[in-house]
Image: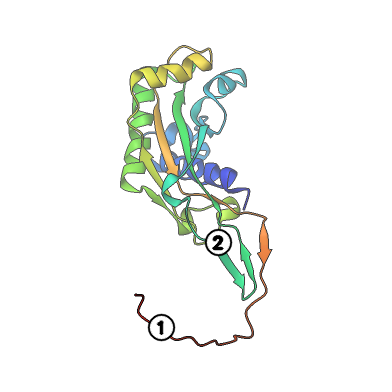
Amino acid sequence: MYTALLSTSLTLSGYLRNKLESDPVLGLLFNPLQGGTLSVSLQTHEDMLTTPLNGLSVWLYRITRDPDLLNDPPIRLNPAGYRQAPLPLRLHYLITPVLTPAPPNNPETAQRILGKVMQSLYDHAVLSGADLVGDFSGTSTVLRARLEPMTLEELTRIWNALEQAYQLCVSYEVTVPLIDSDIVEQYTPVTDAIPSYAVIVDEL
């Protein structure tokens, strides 16, 4: 399905939102039933500040092909039809706390939020079944989240591209949502075989 990108983003952000809202401390900030006003958004850090919106930015900033699955064979649809293998992807998310003057103790709150995010994705790195939302809901899709070992220079380049001052953040790679191909090829199955005979001789 071509909505794999959106469904992955909604699944990841929804899972993190649930973990933040259910936390005894952070739930006071994120859970609207407890008076929380912070949100989990797919917007960039800058867009959230412009809105204005406080909380956690889960921003999809890079998409790459998964080289380990590029040679998967076509999918057989019927005896005469094949669909081109899906496009395997790795999605890269920049996860950043976004806190304007409220709430108080912003550095401590930002670190607490990031700590909860990292704990949640460390304890539950595979998202499937009831975790899935969007068009993935009810499917057998499996998403795997991995903390990317990015250097400060690599992260700084991202913030320079955004023309924003560097913010405390982490990057996660999520695999493998697949985008299905629309290319279907039909082949005429073999119905008759004509045997032939020959004599095998040694070459001189």
State which mark lies toward you, 2 or 1.
1
Quarter residue 120 falls in: top left
- In which quadrant is the C terminus drawn? bottom left
Q: In the image, what residue occupies the spot 43% across and 33% down? A: 28
**Vertical relation: 67 (above or below) 162:** below
Quarter residue 196 falls in: bottom right
- Pick the front one: 177 or 135: 177
Marks 2 and 1 sit apart, C-alpha to C-alpha, by 37 Å
Q: In the image, what residue occupies the spot 50% across and 13% down? A: 164
- Pick the front one: 187 or 201: 201
Count residues near mark 2 (Cα–Cα under 10 Å), then give few for <14, some for 14-19, many for 20+: some
- Pick the front one: 15 or 71: 71
User: In the rendered image, which residue does mark 1 sit on?
Assistant: 200
Q: What residue type is labelled 1?
A: Ile
User: In the rendered image, which residue does mark 2 sit on?
Assistant: 74
Q: Is residue 1 left or right of residue 8?
A: right
* Residue 177 percent coordinates (x, y): 51, 49
Count residues near mark 1 (Cα–Cα under 10 Å), then give few for <14, some for 14-19, many for 20+: few
Q: Is residue 198 left or right of residue 50?
A: left
**Vertical relation: 128 (above or below) 107:** below
